[in-house]
Amino acid sequence: MKGPLENAMDRAEEVTAWERSQNDVYREHSPADPMFIRVLAGEVKLLRKAIEMYRAHIPESLCLHCSGYGRRPYGSTATWRGGIGGQAVTDDVCDKCWGTGDADRHGVNLRAMESEFRRLREVEARMKGLEK
Ligand SMILES: [Zn+2]
């Protein structure tokens, strides 16, 4: 009588033999390499997992300006800054949701922040002028 280890070895041999016969079937009837099919099946599994993880992060109210990506194409290289820019469609942070992709929860308004920096730099320059 065979022990559990021997039974497991027999089972493994059966599975290997079955896999070998399946590989032969694929070789005869499909131009695709069975290894390639296995790799693709693995990729499908990974993609399904990635979609699952992605869905967990999709905001409830998608920003309609960037479709929830948080980035969108602009008509010039100036992007959300506006003003003078090169004539090339350029991707940058969405100026409606400011990068979150969520219509209800916006990120930091970069335009307002840049404007505030400019104002503070002017104040700093004026104060330096007074020191002299
Ligand atoms: Zn957006």
Image (spheres, grey):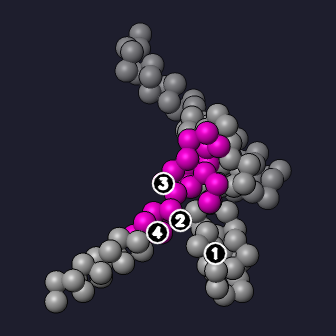
**What's the magenta bit mostly, secondary-structure-wise?**
loop
Q: Amino acid at mark 4?
A: Glu
Q: Which dot marks residue 47?
A: none
Alpha carbon separation for disc pair 2 and 1: 9 Å
Is 5 on the left-hand or right-hand side of 77?
Answer: left
Specify whether tag 2 is near ligand 1 (CB below 8 Å). no
Q: Which dot marks residue 114?
A: 4
Residue on which disc 3 sits = 108
- The region drawn magenta spans 94-117
Residue 109 appearing in the image = yes
SS for tag 2?
Answer: helix
Q: Amino acid at mark 1?
A: Gly
SS for tag 4?
Answer: helix
Question: Which of disc 1 and disc 4 is earlier in sequence?
Answer: 1
Q: Residue 76 appears at what percent x and percent y?
A: 69, 79
Quadrant, the C terminus: bottom left
Q: Pointers 2 and 1 in contact (CB under 8 A)?
A: yes
Q: Amino acid at mark 2?
A: Arg
Question: Which of disc 3 and disc 1 is earlier in sequence?
Answer: 1
Residue 33: quadrant of the picture = bottom right
Above or below residue 119? Residue 10 is above
Alpha carbon separation for disc pair 4 and 2: 5 Å
Outermost top residue: 1
Give the camera-side residue of 132 and 122: 132
Above or below residue 32? Residue 79 is below
